[in-house]
Image (cartoon, helix red, strand yellow):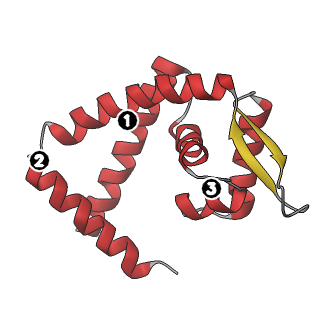
Amino acid sequence: MFDDLIRFETILWNTLDARLRAECDTTLGSLNILMVIDTTPDCRVQEVAGALAITVGGASQSVDRLERAGLCIRTPHPRNRRSSILRLTVAGDKVLARAGAVFDRHLATLLGDPLSAAQRDQLGATLKTLRASISD
């Protein structure tokens, strides 16, 4: 079961990443960060790290790359001088919209074709339970 889970995750990630690179010139990792910034009020690097289960250093480096690409900006945190709030730029919003649609379409094919709606719901609930059981 472990091998199936890990291999499926790797194949799924690589397939979606390849589609995003080909159709949108972005990566799945970048899309994940853009989605977190978009959906997290007053998003900081710490929230990106927590949402994606990566280190703060790794999240910061990824945000730096997105910032250099003009997809997000850091603005001063209104209550904490040592922190910044992340916001998408207009270009970031456009990449998120386009890449998000490509992601959704391909994910629906990769999970929707082999699984019924009930199976997808059960898989989602099971994975959520497992993640919660090993979270800090």
Asked whether disc 2 touches disc 3, contact meaning CB atoms under 8 Å apart, the reply is no
Question: Looking at the picture, does residue 101 appear above or below residue 117?
Answer: above
Q: Where residue 90 sits: x, y (%)? A: 67, 24
Q: Where residue 100 sits: x, y (%)? A: 44, 31
The disc labelled 1 sits on which kind of residue?
Thr
Spatial CA span between label 3 and label 1: 23 Å
Assign the N terminus to one quadrant of the image: bottom left
Quick one: label 1 or label 2, which is nearer the N terminus?
A: 1
Say left or right for 134 vs 37.
left
Of circles 1 and 2, the one toward us is: 2
The disc labelled 2 sits on which kind of residue?
Ala
As drawn, the residue found furthest toward the top would be: 23
> Splitting the image into 4 quarters, where does residue 45 fall?
bottom right
- Could you say which disc has been placed on residue 15 in the image? 1
- Disc 2: which residue: 117
| Mark 2 surroundings within 10 Å by alpha-carbon count, few (fewer than 14), some (14 through 19), many (20 or more) | few
Q: Which of 129 and 73 is in front in this view?
A: 73
The disc labelled 3 sits on which kind of residue?
Val
Task: Please report the residue visible at 37 percent of the width from the left and 35 percent of the height from the top.
Answer: 15
- Disc 3: which residue: 48
Of circles 3 and 1, the one toward us is: 3
| Mark 1 surroundings within 10 Å by alpha-carbon count, few (fewer than 14), some (14 through 19), many (20 or more) | some
Question: Looking at the picture, does residue 56 appear above or below residue 23?
Answer: below
